[in-house]
Amino acid sequence: MPLYQYQCRNCRLQFETLVRPGTIAVCPRCGSAALDKQVAAPAPPGRSKAIVASARRQAASQGHLSNYSARERRKLLDPA
């Protein structure tokens, strides 16, 4: 289901909603179907070092070590 951004012509509310095939989006505030579809730029995936490090720590804590190199896996499994 695509996620669309709309602006209501009646109450000027801007909102995002999932639109199923064959359905008409309505404003969550006033219930109007008089909507203007907005252009929304997609957000790039997070690639900062802090985000990557956090995701790797979480994966390692759950036992998923596939995103680590062999040397890093040995270091994690034998911290001594």
Image (spheres, rainbow, N blue to C red):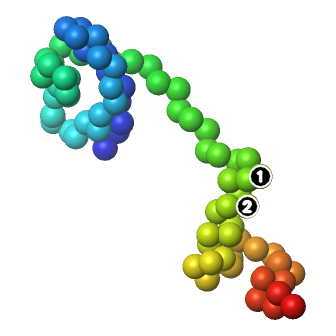
Check disc 1 and give the amino acid type.
Lys
| Residue 78 to residue 70: above or below | below
Image side of residue 50 versus residue 18, left or right: right
* Camera-nearest residue between 6 and 51: 51
* Camera-nearest residue between 25 and 27: 27
* Camera-nearest residue between 28 and 2: 28
Residue 5: in sight, yes or no?
yes
Percent coordinates x, y for residue 75 in the rendering: 84, 83
Quarter where residue 11 is shown? top left
Residue occupied by mark 1: 49
Identify the residue at the far front of this view. 80
| Residue 36 to residue 65: above or below | above
Identify the residue at the far left of this view. 31
* Camera-nearest residue between 54 and 65: 54
Quarter where residue 4 is shown? top left
| Residue 79 to residue 28: above or below | below
Mark 2–mark 1 distance (CA, rounded to whole Å): 6 Å
Element carrying mark 2 = helix
**Residue shown at the point (34%, 39%) measured from the top left:** 2
Check disc 2 and give the amino acid type.
Ala
| Residue 78 to residue 18: above or below | below
**Residue shown at the point (68%, 53%) measured from the top left:** 51
Residue occupied by mark 2: 53
Tags 2 and 1 in contact by the CB under 8 Å rule? yes
State which quarter of the image contains the N terminus.
Answer: top left
Element carrying mark 1 = helix
Percent coordinates x, y for residue 3 in the rendering: 36, 36
